[in-house]
Image (spheres, helix red, strand yellow):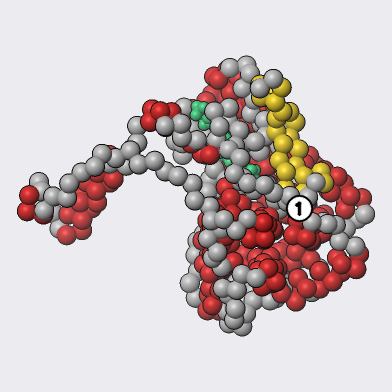
Amino acid sequence: MNTKEINTSFLDNLTLLAEKNNRIKPEFYDKFNVKRGLRNNNGTGVLVGLTEIGSVHGYIFEKNIKIPTEGKLFYRGIDIEDIVEGFQKEGRYGFEECIYLLLFGKLPTQKELNDFNNLLDEYRTLPQNFTENMILKIPSKNIMNKLQRSILVLYSHDENPDDISIKNILKQSLKLIARFPTIISYCYQSKAHYFDKKSLFIHPPQKGIGTAENILFMTRADNKYTKTEAETLDLCLVIHAEHGGGNNSAFATHVVSSSGTDTYSAIAAAVGSLKGPKHGGANIMVHEMILNIKENVPDYQNKSKLKDYLLKILKKETFDKKGLIYGMGHAVYTKSDPRACLLKKKAYELAIEKNAVEEFNLYKNIEELTIELFKEIKGENVVISANVDLYSGFVYEMLNIPADLYTPLFATSRITGWCAHRIEQIVSDPKIIRPAYKSINEKKSYIPLYKRF
Ligand SMILES: CC(=O)SCCNC(=O)CCNC(=O)[C@H](O)C(C)(C)COP(=O)(O)OP(=O)(O)OC[C@H]1O[C@@H](n2cnc3c(N)ncnc32)[C@H](O)[C@@H]1OP(=O)(O)O
Ligand SMILES: O=C([O-])CC(=O)C(=O)O
């Protein structure tokens, strides 16, 4: 064996050792009453905090029995459906208004909204040479990874990065919120150029056009987009902006912020969390799952064949062999996720316009057949529904937004919630988050090297 082969075989042995010596017997979790996933026995989350930012409802309790209900989401107490209806009725974009609402706890007046938009406009531009030195010099195939690194490099461009006074955190937060669209657009351009051999376009952000339009402006070679495209992207940004304190990335923000660390570290951690395929990364997994289904079930309009294949996915026999149908299920929602309902409606409208109803039906059938399969396998009372990630990628596809940007767009919206939760944590609860892990190891003696075998 050459050195490389010896090292590979050594690594294989270390892997076996790591798996063997890190596996805790499942029964111990029950024995010591561990709240795995910070979940109670009935699936509800363990109460670890209070928040006034976002509120997520998916069930009620009657006589101690959990009863599934239609999902509801509130930003600062206002129903997300009313927010969407409100700004759409007034024929304007809603994302900046939601940022204001989530961060400051009240809807802005027209003057406050104008001033706020001007501030975001001022903050959008990246520091000098940042694009050349950070984004173009070290391109990445994964824009979430690149986004995370860009956030950490912005620390070095901040003259006062470790000041955690609220005024400073707010300034840092607003700059990050304003810059995320620019960063993800340039990271995408860099990826498309260096890895996909496309021409490189770096369009500066424009004043006066807001977040959704800027994203379309900066990610497209010709800067062109329609009003419908911008309105649809704005809707996506609005509904992804916040989801309570318990979702994995907001909770990561709470945990990291509670140590007193800087804004860049906290937000980079949140981006890392959101990237996970069980969280925001599910939107790209849905895209990959759809490609996989199309490849393996060419006759995917045939519901029986599609159902057989979904069953194989659930049995871990195919696709990524994790047993998950991405875009389905939720830790809180049961009968429905209001965001998925909004996106499904939008996806259908766009599908009609773009002659893609057959494809829309594939998503719809996945949703319906997964619900059916869950009832058949787990019992009539088991309730599952589509989550926000099922239809979002399809909507983006209809807008000609590349798949590389699906999860980064989620981050570009959700940074709003993260920043609001970071501020709430620091203002309201100075206690460091430090739960307990019970050690179940036996005590052992140290063995001198010459006596080990
Ligand atoms: C923005 C967001 O984060 S939305 C969520 C995006 N994530 C996905 O779409 C990934 C697929 N879905 C999932 O993995 C889960 O539904 C989660 C992570 C969203 C929620 O997880 P949990 O709250 O732990 O799941 P929950 O307790 O509701 O699940 C109960 C059972 O259903 C299973 N289940 C839940 N969702 C799915 C799914 N989509 N596919 C297959 N099985 C599922 C669980 O594995 C669990 O099975 P078990 O009882 O045999 O162990
Ligand atoms: O709440 C959750 O667990 C996940 C979710 O839907 C989100 O963060 O948008």
Q: Kindly state the secondary structure of the residue where label 1 is placed.
A: helix
- The residue positioned 69% from the left and 20% from the top of the image is 63
Question: Residue 6, image x and y in percent?
Answer: 17, 54
x, y percentage for residue 246?
A: 62, 45
Which of 8/312 is in front? Answer: 8
Q: Which residue is mark 1?
A: 238
Left or right position of 48 against 51: left
Q: Residue furthest left?
A: 450
Quarter in which the N terminus is drawn: bottom left
Q: Position of residue 293 (x, y in %)?
A: 55, 36
Camera sees residue 103:
yes
Q: Is residue 410 above or below residue 220?
A: above
Percent of width and height locating residue 64: 66, 22
- The answer to whether one can see residue 356 in this image is no
Q: Residue at x 67, y 47 (%)?
A: 50
Tell me what residue is drawn at x 64 percent, y 76 percent: 126
Nearest the camera: 178 or 400? Answer: 178
Q: From the viewer's perspective, is residue 168 above or below residue 64?
A: below
- Find residue 436 and report its image quarter: top left
Three-letter code for the amino acid on which mark 1 is drawn: Val
Q: For residue 121, what is the image quadrant?
A: bottom right
Residue ID at (46%, 35%) = 34
**Residue 164 lies in what quarter of the image?**
bottom right
Report if the beta carbon of the residue with label 1 is closer than 8 angstroms to ligand 2. Answer: no
In which of the image's four quarters is ligand 1 placed?
top right
Numbered-mark total = 1
Residue density around tag 1, few if under 14, some if 14–19, many if 20 or more, within 10 Å: many
Residue 223 against residue 329 in the figure, above or below: below
